[in-house]
Image (cartoon, grey):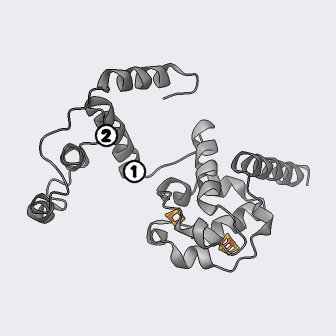
Amino acid sequence: MIEAAKTIRAGEEMLAEIERRSGQDVSSCYQCGTCSSTCTATLAFDYPPHLFMRLLQLGLVERALASRTAQMCYDCMTCSSRCPVGIDVADVIETTKNIADESGRSRPPKEVALFRRLFLRNVCRHGRLHEAGLLAWYNIKSGQFFNDLSLVPLVLRKKKVHLVPPRIRQRRELRRIFRQAKTKPGAK
Ligand code: SF4
Ligand code: SF4
C-alpha cells in the first residue's frame, strides 16, 4: 500500500516537472486522437501521441520515459499544430525524452543510438551535416551494407545529397562547442 502511494506520488511529481519544463497543461488533453491521426511516425512508436498523453495523465510516467515514442519522435510538430486545445504535444514528448536522457532512464533502440552518435560525429567533423557520409557510415556500422542503395542514383541526380563534404569556415568554433558540451556535468 505504502509502495503504491510512493509510486503515485513519484508519477505526479514527474508529471509536474514535465509540465513545468514544457509549459504545457497535460491534463487539458481530452483524448480526441487528432495528434495521432496526423502523426507520420506512429508505426515506429509503442504509444501513439494521444496514448502517450494518457500515460502521463494517469501518472504512468516511467512507461513514457522508457518508451520508443519518446526516442523516435522526430519533432516535426504536426501534432502540435493540429491539437484543438493548443497543446504543444511535440514539446511534451521532447521534454519527457530529455528527462529520460538526463536521468539515465532512456532506452533508445540500438539503431537509433547508433544513428545519433554518427550524426553528431558527422556534424562535428564537417561543421554541418554531410548526408552522404552519414548514410555510408550508418550502413557500414549497422551491417546493412546495401540499405537504400538503389536510391543513390536518384538522390544524386536530383542533387539531394552531395558526395563532397561541405566546407564550413566556423568548423573550429563548432568543435569547441562540442568539446565544451562533452565536459558539461552529465554529458556522455
Ligand atoms: S512531433 Fe513527433 S509525435 Fe508529433 S507528429 Fe511529429 S513525429 Fe509525430
Ligand atoms: S490532439 Fe490534443 S487534445 Fe487531442 S488527443 Fe492529442 S493532445 Fe489530446
Residue pictured at 29% horizontal, 42% vertical: 129
- Residue named by callout 1: 112
> Against 40, is 184 above or below?
above
> Against 135, is 77 above or below?
below
Residue pictured at 69% horizontal, 67% vertical: 86
In the image, what residue type sits under mark 1?
Val
Which x, y percent locates residue 109?
A: 43, 52
On whether ligand 1 comes within 8 Å of the CB at mark 1, the answer is no
Q: Which part of the image, by quadrant, shows the N terminus?
A: bottom right
> Is 156 displayed left or right of 143 in the figure?
left
Mark 1 or 2, nearer chain start:
1
Residue pictured at 30% horizontal, 38% vertical: 128
Residue pictured at 32% horizontal, 26% vertical: 170
Question: Helix, strand, or loop for circle 1?
Answer: helix
- Residue named by callout 2: 118
Question: Helix, strand, or loop for circle 2?
Answer: helix
